[in-house]
Image (tube, grey):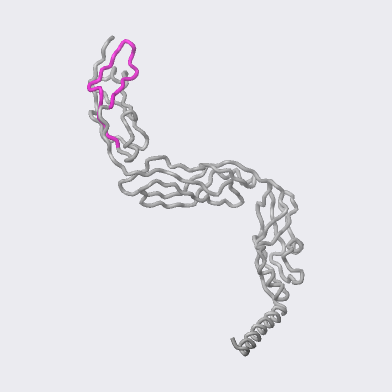
Amino acid sequence: MTPKFLKIFSSTIFSIILWVFVSFSYEYTTTLKFPIKFTDIKESYTILSQSANEINMTINGQGWALAQISSTTIKYFQIPTDKKVGYQSADVREALSTNSWINPSVQISIISPSVIDYSIERLKSKVVPILPDSQISIKNGYGVVSNIILNPDSIKIFGPQTLIKSIKYVFTDKIQLKNIDEDISLEIVLMPIKHFKFEKETTNIEFSVQKIVDKTFKSVPVIAENVPNLRTLELFPPNIDLTLRGGLENLGIMGIDSIKATVDFNNAFIDTLGRISPKISIPNFTTLTNVNPKTLKYIIKQN
């Protein structure tokens, strides 16, 4: 690097620094926008309403001071409250001193709005159920083989006492699950409600999906119920075969002890055809597709 190049480079850098210094020494006018944050609110109280959500300020000052305000990490305008319950008004100019991040060397020429109306109300809480807003489609040949579970299925909410009575439940964000062929465990966000806070912002939705198949259970015993002590109800045949449709994994571990087939003695006693149909109880998330035989012959004997 030649001495001539170093001289030119140094002169250029110095000129840029000088230009920046001179430019930032001039007076400028800018308009900035800041969201409002109320302070000094008592514990167990909350803001119910406010006439504006942000403040527009037209500021005059040197470039250095304006750049400092524009680059501040504080992104809100603080308004201290009166700590009283009910409707109140705040003069925004009176709140300028509370916002220490505003450089005292600048001049605030315009503030809009100049007055903020707001109301403070007591904070209440209650527990409400969560309702999923979901659209679920299952792949052909598969099915849901469990309850759809939300965990948690209810949530504690906090809000103004005049509004909390009207909140009966909280919805989740809308979710769409298409062509599902496997178990689902998914975290979903709760839909926010204006003026309210939630103990937790999410819930989990869980359910099981399996391939749907048929399985036949042979020789399921039929039990006679409500038989008097001095009577006997004999069935022909005493066992039945039946077919269930359900999830592949669920049916794979299911035995005949999961199924209950019964007949009621009283139905046989008043029957005039000589045949009765068994009542069959099957596990949840299965469907009975076939019973053989569908009716049973019987004999009532005196003991």
Judging depth in this view, the residue of 75 and 225 nearest the camera is: 75
Residue at (72%, 78%) from the top-left corner?
A: 27
* Residue 206 spot, x, y in % from top left: 44, 44
Residue at (47%, 52%) from the top-left corner?
A: 174
Confirm whether the magenta stretch covers residue 287.
no
95 versus 249 height, above or below: below
Confirm whether the magenta stretch covers residue 234.
yes
Residue at (75%, 61%) from the top-left corner?
A: 98
Residue at (30%, 46%) from the top-left corner?
A: 141
**Total labels drawn:** 0
The quadrant of the picture occupied by the N terminus is: bottom right
- Asked where in the image residue 33 lies, by quadrant, the reply is bottom right
Magenta: main secondary structure equals strand
Q: Does 287 sit left or right of 115 as displayed?
A: left
Q: Please report the bounds of the magenta region as a residue range.
A: 220-244
Looking at this rendering, what residue extends furthest in the bottom direction?
4
291 versus 271 height, above or below: below
Judging depth in this view, the residue of 49 and 179 nearest the camera is: 179
Q: Does 169 sit left or right of 103 as displayed?
A: left
* Residue 86 spot, x, y in % from top left: 71, 50
* Residue 35 spot, x, y in % from top left: 65, 62
137 versus 286 height, above or below: below
Q: Does 47 sit left or right of 167 as displayed?
A: right
- Asked where in the image residue 267 lies, by quadrant, the reply is top left
* Residue 70 spot, x, y in % from top left: 66, 69
The quadrant of the picture occupied by the C terminus is: top left
